[in-house]
Image (cartoon, grey):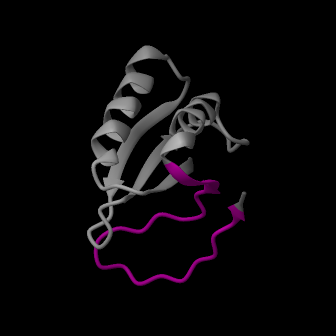
Amino acid sequence: MWLETITLRTGRASEATKVVELCRQAFQSSTPEKLLKMTVYSSCKYASDISVYLEWESDPGSESVMSIAICEALRDMGLINHTVWTQEQEFSGTERFTTRFHYRE
């Protein structure tokens, strides 16, 4: 599994609604292979910070076509950070763990 994160810092908190709708349209209008889930979060501390998470089931790769299109659509709304992450280990419940994560930009 791998994960893409798109983080947007906008000038206005009202942009969050636009981002959610844009992501909904991107998700519904395309048929991405192996996309498990798309989730949109807004910061509890800064309402103008929004993150989009795309979870993929396929082998890790570079940025997806869908994420590149989302970044292009968000470009005029503010500052964007787009990263790709690969899953190293998954823990659940009360397990204690130490693990390393690989970060690719």
Q: Is residue 97 above or below residue 21?
A: below
Give yes or no for residue 92 being in the magenta stretch.
Answer: yes
Quarter holding residue 89: bottom right
Quarter of the image where the C terminus is located: bottom right
88 or 65, which lies in front?
65
Magenta stretch bounds: 78-103
Answer above or below: position of 12 versus 70.
below
Q: Residue at x 34, y 68 (%)?
A: 92
Is 86 in front, or is 48?
Answer: 48
For this view, does 3 lie left or right of residue 92?
right
Residue at image location 53% in from the left, 29% down from the top: 34
Direction from residue 23 to residue 44 in the image, left or right: left
Which residue is drawn at the image coordinates 53% and 23% (left, top)?
32
Helix, strand or loop for the magenta stretch, by majority: loop
Is residue 26 found inside the magenta-colored segment of the image?
no
User: Residue at position x 58%, y 77% from top?
Assistant: 99
- Counting from the top left corner in percent of width and height, residue 29 is at 43, 15
**With 40 as the anchor, is 34 left or right in this view?**
right
Q: Quadrant of residue 25?
A: top left
